[in-house]
């Protein structure tokens, strides 16, 4: 796979990263078709990742190509372009926080690298080194092959001011892929320089034309056993685990040796956390449900809340007040003993106390998924 991705990237670097758009007129009065970044601005606009900044006195839309880009705006561009589904299901209404939260959740944009201390930094103008660091982590998350270290050292040697930033690796990485170049004839990077809206549109198109072929080569989402994500395949994989298939490495590190009925596990040490999620770490029933959810769909699979509890599918993560579990089926409607109807579902869950330890149970009595104690359900199905 890496050889295939390397070939794709090599071809992109040979034939260019910014395709020409076919359009006879501009959607913005201040971006004529003769503008140096017209093609990229039009493509970014048509892709829905950038918008105009207002209208002139004649009512015509303007883009403000020389305007500076803030870190919040670049966050929005990256998430709109590469994580549109994640934004759709994000909780906050504020666009800047929503986009920033999804970006941080999906890859390391800099919390651990000293670039962004908090959301309070969002309004500031984006620096070139911040842009480089963010794109570096995005490409890393997408599985783009690393250039040879010697190649990176060769690139660094041609950037006179590379030693003025501690993020030289990210900068040289972006130079390698043609995402960024020098700002003067000497090739200086100018880490604290800012970026215009026109430049950002060009950089977006370059980034898009690296990532999209890699995603296409990777194919549709699959389960941890390599099968496509369908209900039938999820049920088959769950049955394999029920019959003794070994848990994945992260689950083993958390102490799971089996997901079979009545299998024992330590409910507390260590806790288990789901990656790319706000759910945090779990113990007891949550520890089992989180681990099993990951071992079905994989730690990188996108997850979001199920809009309607009647739409829960096998493998979905269910949260009741005081309990977490994995659905074994789709819910079905049942009339209980007092004549009241509920949507209910059989599930596989874990739990335990300090004395007895934890154990796993399959099936049992169905639980309501539309009652007062129902909190949320999460899915990793791609549609």
Image (cartoon, grey):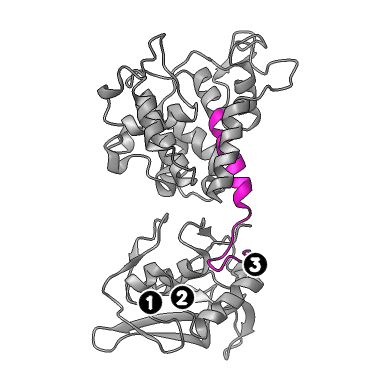
Q: In this rendering, is residue 151 above or below 125? A: below
Apparent side of residue 251 relative to residue 39 in the rendered image (left or right) = left
**Eye-nearest disc, 2 or 3:** 3
The reply to whether the C-beta atoms of the residues labelled 3 and 1 are less than 8 Å apart is no
**Element carrying mark 2:** strand
**Residue 327 location in percent, x, y?**
54, 75
Q: Secondary structure at mark 3?
A: loop
Residue placed under numbered mark 2 in the picture = 325
Which badge, 3 or 1, comes first in the chain's sequence? 3
Name the residue rendered at 26%, 74% in the picture: 269
Check the picture and name the quadrant holding the C terminus: bottom right
Per the rendered image, the range of residues in magenta is 206-229
Answer with left or right where residue 366 lies relative to residue 289. Answer: right
- In which quadrant of the rendered view does residue 343 lie? bottom right
56 over 302 or under it: above or below: above
Disc 3 vs disc 1: which is toward the camera? 3
CA gap between label 2 and label 1 equals 7 Å
What's the mark number on residue 285?
A: 1
Is 191 on the left-hand or right-hand side of 355? right
Circle 3 is placed at which residue position? 230
Q: Marks 2 and 3: CB-CB under 8 Å?
A: no
Do the residues under discs 2 and 1 have CB atoms within 8 angstroms? yes
Up the image or down, 196 lies above or below 352; here it is above
Q: Residues within 10 Å of mark 2 (few under 14, many from 20)?
A: many
Task: From this view, report whether residue 30 is shown above or below residue 242.
Answer: above
- In reply to whether residue 213 is colored magenta, the answer given is yes
Specify few, some or many for label 1: CA neighbours under 10 Å numbering under 14, 14-19, or 20 or more: many
């Amino acid at each position: 796979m890496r050889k295939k991705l390397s070939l794709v990237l090599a071809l992109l670097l040979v034939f260019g990263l910014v395709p020409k758009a076919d359009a006879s007129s501009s959607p913005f009065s201040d971006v004529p078709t003769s503008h140096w970044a017209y093609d990229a601005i039009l493509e970014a606009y048509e892709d829905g990742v950038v918008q105009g900044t207002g209208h002139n006195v004649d009512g015509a839309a303007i883009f403000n190509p020389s305007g500076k880009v803030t870190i919040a705006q670049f966050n929005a561009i990256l998430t709109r372009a590469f994580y549109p589904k994640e934004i759709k299901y994000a909780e906050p209404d504020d666009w800047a926080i929503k986009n920033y939260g999804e970006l941080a959740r999906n890859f390391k944009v800099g919390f651990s690298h000293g670039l962004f201390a908090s959301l309070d930094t969002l309004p500031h103008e984006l620096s070139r080194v911040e842009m480089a660091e963010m794109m570096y982590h995005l490409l890393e998350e997408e599985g783009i092959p690393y250039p040879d270290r010697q190649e990176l050292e060769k690139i660094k040697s041609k950037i006179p001011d590379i030693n003025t930033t501690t993020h030289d690796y990210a900068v040289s990485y972006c130079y390698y892929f043609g995402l960024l170049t020098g700002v003067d004839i000497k090739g200086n990077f100018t880490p604290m320089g800012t970026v215009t809206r026109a430049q950002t549109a060009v950089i977006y198109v370059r980034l898009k034309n690296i990532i999209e072929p890699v995603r296409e080569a990777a194919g549709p989402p699959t389960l941890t056993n390599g099968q496509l994500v369908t209900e039938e395949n999820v049920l088959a994989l769950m049955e394999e685990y029920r019959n003794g298939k070994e848990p994945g490495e992260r689950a083993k590190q958390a102490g799971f040796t089996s997901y079979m009925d009545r299998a024992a596990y330590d409910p507390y040490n260590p806790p288990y956390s789901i990656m790319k999620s706000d759910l945090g770490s779990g113990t007891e029933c949550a520890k089992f449900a989180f681990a099993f959810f990951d071992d079905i769909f994989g730690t990188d699979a996108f997850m979001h809340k199920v809009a309607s509890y009647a739409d829960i599918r096998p493998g979905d993560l269910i949260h009741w007040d005081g309990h977490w579990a994995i659905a074994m089926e789709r819910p079905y409607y049942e009339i209980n003993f007092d004549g009241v109807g509920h949507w209910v579902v059989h599930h596989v869950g874990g739990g335990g106390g300090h004395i007895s330890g934890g154990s796993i149970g399959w099936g049992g009595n169905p639980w309501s998924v539309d009652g007062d104690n129902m909190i949320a359900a999460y899915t990793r199905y791609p549609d």
